Image: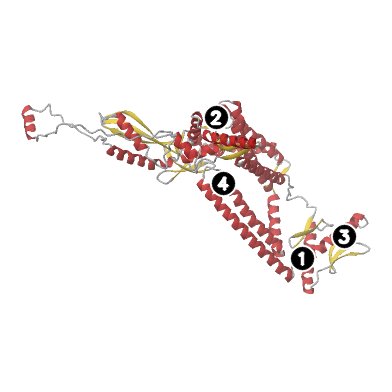
């Protein structure tokens, strides 16, 4: 259900972005040198009507004259305590709209005898009268008191909504911290943050629209932004390209990228596995589908945005000439930066090594990438080195080996040392994974002993020094506890070639060392090593109070009792058994082979998918409950 909700939210988000961008792309662009046919008459931030030019007087000049006349009449009417009145005055030569005996608008003579002109006069009179009455009413003390009261109510309501959203945000944030593997919480936090911004924006817009002064200021700012975004920036062919259209094309491309990524993820997880092709072939198909859809979609978006490809080709040709005169390295790094951003072979926060430099990726820019090494200074590396050279990524596999080396004197029991070192490596530590388990290997013969290697596995490569120190501490403690010596550097002095008299004198000066007779050394039992998989303990914990979610679930109008999802079991094993995702899936497969769990229809192996599985112990309980229900029905 959570995965379906996530897909639904993504689909709605992509659809909304696409509709918004299409609206912006096909919105009319106002050229700077184009003749404006009509201009609105605005009073207190409200458009009352639109007028055109008359003779040599432009539409803008007529609109400014009407607006100033209305504001003057409105100011006089406030002192009278009565709203101004708009009248139609006819004469033999023309028809004029007047407001309190002030000439306001002259009707062209060409339209005096038409029925349309009569209707237009009445419409203009009504619109102007309604606008004046509303502006007059908004300037009265009663309206001001009412507006302040409504603004206070809206503010209190906004605070209550914000308080509820903040509490919900903190609740989901705590759930995310407890369960960081669930990405659905991040999407919920983003939606809540957008809701908080939307609530405040709605309150601010409501407060602005309540008062005529703020509404007028807001209208002027909006018109300024509208003229800025719709002004022509440059010409491509016969189309005028504005900032509004550029932003719309960019938003549409982003929506295309999100939608294609969502489709390709479904293709790789749902459709391509049904072909049973090799994983490399599936990746190649997904790659070509993704970039093919992106290329075709981008061309269609540019075409819909009015981009003339012939003019664009000329522009790209001129840019290519400039690149040929010395910008090859910059362009190469820029293209490699795009590859790093799109293909993401490395990510911010990962531990990488490029040549002799090793550190954490801090920033991936358009031309360079910054990494921070262990000395805490920043190294800036060109992006081309990440694409053309070899890059060691410690985070990409999801698992890191921590190695510790130990030397043991010759003659020591190897099997005994193996058990001691394995017991030291299996001491519980929050960063060491249980699956795969720690391992001990006899490596080689060295000059002063036998060398063993102890290996433990962790998720975070940045914790290697901490875990290595833990391993050496436990190894030292266990070697001392079980009496295993560590060889010390030795130097032997051979006196065979000395003069016999000198040799006899040296022997006489050396004190006699009396060594006790060898005694039988008591046998020490080695530490017991843990089994890699204690299936009885694992299964009982999974079925316990803090285990995997086992409950009755419905699918296709059918109820399945005491089942759990394979994806939930994988996440539980990763958290509670400290296993990697691959190891958790393998543990599920082993539990299925051991006869501990099974698919409800026995149609699937264990998979990290929302498939229903059940413990065989729960299967017996379900069968007993079903039989008892049948017996009750028969008795009735």
Marks 3/4: CA–CA distance: 57 Å
> Would residue 113 appear left or right of 516 to someone viewing this image?
right
Q: Quadrant of residue 469?
A: top left
Q: Which mark is residue 135?
A: 1
Which residue is under mark 3?
122
Please identify, in this view, whether the residue under mark 2 or under mark 3 is nearer the observer.
2
Label 2 neighbour load within 10 Å: few <14, some 14-19, many 20+: some
* Residue tagged 4: 186
> Is 506 above or below relative to 199?
above
Q: CA distance from mark 2 to mark 1?
A: 74 Å
The number of discs equals 4
Q: Which type of secondary structure does the marked residue at label 1 adopt?
A: helix
Q: Earlier in the sequence, mark 3 or mark 4?
A: 3
Residue visible at 63% across and 62% down?
156
Nearer-N-terminus badge (2/4): 4
Q: Secondary structure at mark 2?
A: loop
Circle 3 packing at 10 Å, graded few (<14), some (14-19), many (20+), is some
Left or right: 111 as drawn, with respect to 379: right
Q: How is the image coloured?
A: secondary structure
**Dot 4 crowding, Cα within 10 Å, few <14, some 14–19, many 20+:** some
Q: Quadrant of residue 530?
A: top left
Would residue 109 be seen by someone viewing this image from the given angle?
Answer: no
- Residue 603 vertical position relative to residue 111 in the rendered view, above or below: above
What residue sits right under mark 2 in the picture? 605
Question: Looking at the picture, how far across and down is residue 611, in whole percent?
Answer: 58, 34
Give the percent coordinates (x, y) of residue 561: 59, 37
Q: CA distance from mark 1 to mark 3?
A: 20 Å
């Amino acid at each position: 259900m959570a995965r379906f909700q996530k897909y639904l939210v993504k689909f709605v988000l992509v659809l909304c972005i696409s509709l918004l961008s299409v609206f912006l792309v096909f919105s009319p662009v106002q050229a700077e040198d184009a003749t404006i046919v009509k201009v609105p008459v605005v009073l207190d931030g409200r458009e009352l009507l639109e007028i055109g030019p008359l003779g040599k007087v432009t539409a803008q000049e007529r609109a400014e004259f009407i607006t100033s006349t209305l504001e003057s009449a409105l100011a006089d009417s406030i002192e009278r305590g009565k709203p101004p009145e708009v009248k139609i005055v006819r004469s033999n030569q023309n028809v004029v709209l007047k407001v309190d005996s002030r000439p306001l608008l002259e009707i062209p003579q060409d339209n005096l005898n038409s029925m349309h002109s009569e209707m237009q006069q009445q419409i203009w009179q009504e619109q102007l009268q309604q606008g004046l009455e509303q502006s007059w009413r908004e300037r009265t003390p009663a309206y001001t008191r009412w507006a302040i009261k409504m603004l206070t109510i809206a503010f209190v309501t906004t605070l209550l909504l914000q308080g509820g959203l903040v509490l919900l945000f903190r609740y989901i944030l705590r759930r995310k911290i407890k369960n960081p593997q669930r990405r659905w919480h991040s999407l919920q936090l983003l939606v809540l943050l957008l809701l908080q911004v939307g609530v405040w924006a709605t309150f601010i817009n409501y407060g602005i629209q309540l008062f005529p002064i703020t509404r007028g200021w807001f209208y002027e700012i909006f018109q300024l932004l509208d003229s800025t975004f719709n002004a022509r920036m440059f010409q491509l062919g016969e189309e005028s390209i504005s900032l509004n259209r550029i932003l719309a094309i960019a938003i549409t491309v982003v929506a295309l990228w999100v939608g294609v990524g969502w489709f390709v993820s479904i293709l790789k997880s749902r459709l391509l596995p049904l072909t049973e092709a090799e994983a490399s072939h599936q990746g190649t198909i997904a790659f070509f589908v993704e970039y093919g859809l992106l290329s075709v979609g981008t061309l269609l978006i540019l075409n819909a945005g009015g981009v003339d490809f012939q003019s664009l080709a000329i522009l790209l040709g001129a840019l290519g000439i400039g690149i040929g005169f010395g910008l090859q390295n910059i362009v190469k790094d820029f293209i490699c930066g795009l590859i790093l951003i799109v293909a993401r072979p490395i990510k911010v926060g990962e531990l990488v090594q490029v040549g002799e430099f090793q550190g954490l990726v801090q920033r991936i820019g358009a031309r360079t990438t910054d990494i921070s090494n262990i000395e805490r200074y920043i190294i800036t590396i060109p992006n081309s080195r990440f694409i053309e050279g070899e890059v060691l990524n410690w985070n990409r596999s999801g698992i890191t080996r921590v190695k510790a080396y130990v030397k043991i004197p010759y003659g020591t029991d190897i099997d005994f040392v193996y058990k001691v070192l394995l017991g030291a490596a299996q001491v519980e530590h929050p960063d060491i994974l249980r699956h795969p388990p720690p391992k001990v290997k006899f490596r080689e013969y060295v000059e002063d002993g036998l060398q063993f290697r102890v290996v433990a596995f962790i998720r975070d490569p940045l914790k290697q020094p901490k875990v290595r120190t833990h391993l050496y501490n436990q190894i030292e403690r266990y070697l001392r506890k079980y009496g295993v010596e560590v060889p010390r550097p030795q130097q032997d002095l051979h006196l065979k070639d000395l003069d016999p008299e000198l040799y006899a004198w040296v022997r006489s000066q050396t004190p006699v060392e009396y060594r006790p007779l060898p005694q039988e050394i008591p046998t020490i039992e080695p530490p017991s090593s843990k089994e890699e998989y204690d299936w009885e303990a694992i299964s009982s914990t999974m079925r316990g109070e803090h285990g995997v979610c086992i409950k009755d679930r419905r699918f296709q109008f059918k109820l399945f009792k005491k089942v759990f999802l394979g994806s939930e079991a994988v996440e539980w094993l990763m958290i509670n058994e400290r296993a990697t995702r691959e190891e958790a899936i393998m543990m599920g497969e082993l539990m299925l082979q051991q006869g501990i769990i099974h698919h409800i229809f026995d149609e699937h192996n264990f998979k990290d998918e929302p498939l229903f599985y059940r413990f065989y112990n729960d299967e017996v309980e379900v069968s007993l409950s079903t039989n008892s229900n049948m017996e009750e029905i028969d008795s009735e």
